[in-house]
Image (cartoon, grey):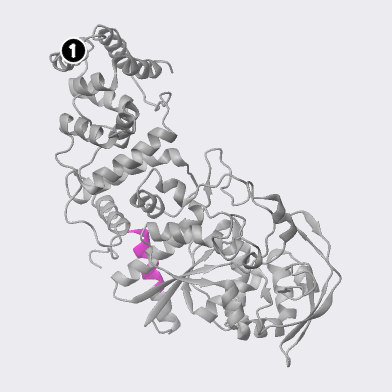
Amino acid sequence: MTDGIIGKGTWIDKVADNLLKREKKLGRTVDLIRVESGIGASGIPHIGSMGDAVRAYGIAMALKNFGYNTELIAYSDDMDGLRKVPAGLPGWLEEHLAKPVSRIPDPFGDCHTSYGAHMSSILLDGLDKIGVKYRFQSGAETYKRGDLVNQIDTILKNSVSLGQKIAEFIGQEKYNETLPYFPICKGCGRLYVAKAEKYFADEKKVQYTCSGSKISNQELKGCGYSGEVDINEGEGKLAWKVEFAARWQALDIRFEAYGKDIMDSVRVNDWVANEILGYAHPLHVKYEMFLDKRGKKISKSAGNVLTPQMWLRYGTAESILLLLFKRISGSRHVGLDDIPSLMDEYDAYEDIYFDKIREENQVKLTKIKGIYEFVNHLKPPKQPTAHVPYRILVQQASLFSSDKRTDKIYGRLKKYGVVKEKTDDLLKKIELASNWSDDLFSTEEKFQIEMKDNHKNAIAELIQSLKSFIGSEQKPESPKNLQSKVFDIARNNGIEPKELFTLLYKILINSDRGPRIGNYVLDLGVDRTINILQKHLVN
């Protein structure tokens, strides 16, 4: 840490530094610092779910960079009950509402032992594919092993003061009437419907009656069963309002980020950890939720889920990590259509990191280089890769059938002088862009570009000039003639040639740079180029 810069100069380093200062002030050992991310297992994990784990991983990396041993715990909430059937999943799941997701059959077949295991595996697979290191912990197994028994016992013994404090904090009176513990009813196998009425501390048993409950605005009738459950047997779970605190202490968690949608639960759990369990709660960072392009919250049950696997069909692991590491504050609209920009933005970060692009602002330079290193797991490559704007690859892929398409695209790129040799990195990007071209590319795509009157006049003149090249695209002299024509049009309209070329790159591939316009336009197709240019003239 020099000249006021902490670590790599990013928000990640600042949070890690604050964590260390706090731990030392608390007098706790820092021999092993555990950070945690909760993995929801009740619905299909999405890019926001991944964000929670990736940011915790970032803090772990920063701590390791400072010289400390760290571990990321990926804790699956697979003991939770199913509250509603997510969009697109089979209707028979209605029969399993309120049952622990670890005890519901896998709705996708028999590839996993349960509904919860399948859902958790989707996120874990995504984390594996982007290189995040973690230790998986199943909530169901944690309860079954009795890892939380001491915490459950202490919490239930203090249920009266807990109920009062929850009511005081968030106005919820529920836990003044029932214990903050959900037994799994022996009669119907469901959570939430069984009301925990009394705790027998000497026997460590909870007395309950399955009287029903309201879940996600749906009334679920109880089966009427009355009985007892032993907290040692893993046949019940703590309410969310206290469960975080229990596992923080049991697992010795020092950091956990959270989304603002569970802010009240975290506030209560912090109090429980501090005052009931005698464990200083972890350092937190609050982040805003990801929204879809319509401004709706991305939800496991609403059917607008963007999964890590969907993203990785079109974008690299680095593009996901850049999205999640760039910043943590503020809400963001995110969708698959962000991938092209993030792919190119990563290349820009790499160019700045290797000083191929100058950045005069030293604070910004340090931050960009730091984020680039975190995106590369603090093991940046020795040299940059060949950069080709993502939309060039998409457009080229759209020109060829799948037969030997990669070779044909590479041939074009080499002809343009954009690349010199085939590399695994380049071939992977061609594959991703080809997937985009096949699944998502639209010739109607248009970027908002501000144009002055002389710019519009130049584009209109170019459209007319392009029409004269129809039928002569294959003539050897055509690329050179078209290139010269662009120079002439720029001068005719009082525009610097470089400025007009930059405008054309923006219109055609949404980039400031690109291959020689003459070659590229003729390969793209005169009619297609005219169509693209005309759309930008209509604002």
Q: Residue at x 19, y 44 (%)?
A: 358
The local crowd at label 1, few if under 14, some if 14 to 19, many if 20 or more residues have their Cα within 10 Å, is some
Q: Is 208 part of what is drawn in magenta? A: no
Q: Is residue 312 left or right of residue 167?
A: left
Please state the extent of the stretch shown in magenta in the rendering: 10-19
Q: Is residue 143 left or right of residue 18?
A: right
- Residue 114 in the image, given as x and y percentages of width and height: 60, 64
Say whether residue 348 is visible.
no
User: From what the image shows, is residue 503 above or below residue 271?
Assistant: above
- Residue 174 in the image, given as x and y percentages of width and height: 77, 68
What amino acid is found at the position of numbered circle 1 in the picture? Lys
Dominant secondary structure of the residues highlighted in magenta in the image: helix
Q: Residue at x 29, y 45 (%)?
A: 428
- Residue 539 in the image, given as x and y percentages of width and height: 43, 18
Image quadrant containing the N terminus: bottom left
User: From what the image shows, is residue 436 above or below residue 9?
Assistant: above
Quadrant of the image occupied by residue 367: bottom left
Q: Secondary structure at mark 1?
A: helix
- Residue 329 in the image, given as x and y percentages of width and height: 46, 53
Task: Report the front residue among 156 and 517.
Answer: 517
Quadrant of the image occupied by residue 19: bottom left
Q: Which residue is mark 1?
A: 485
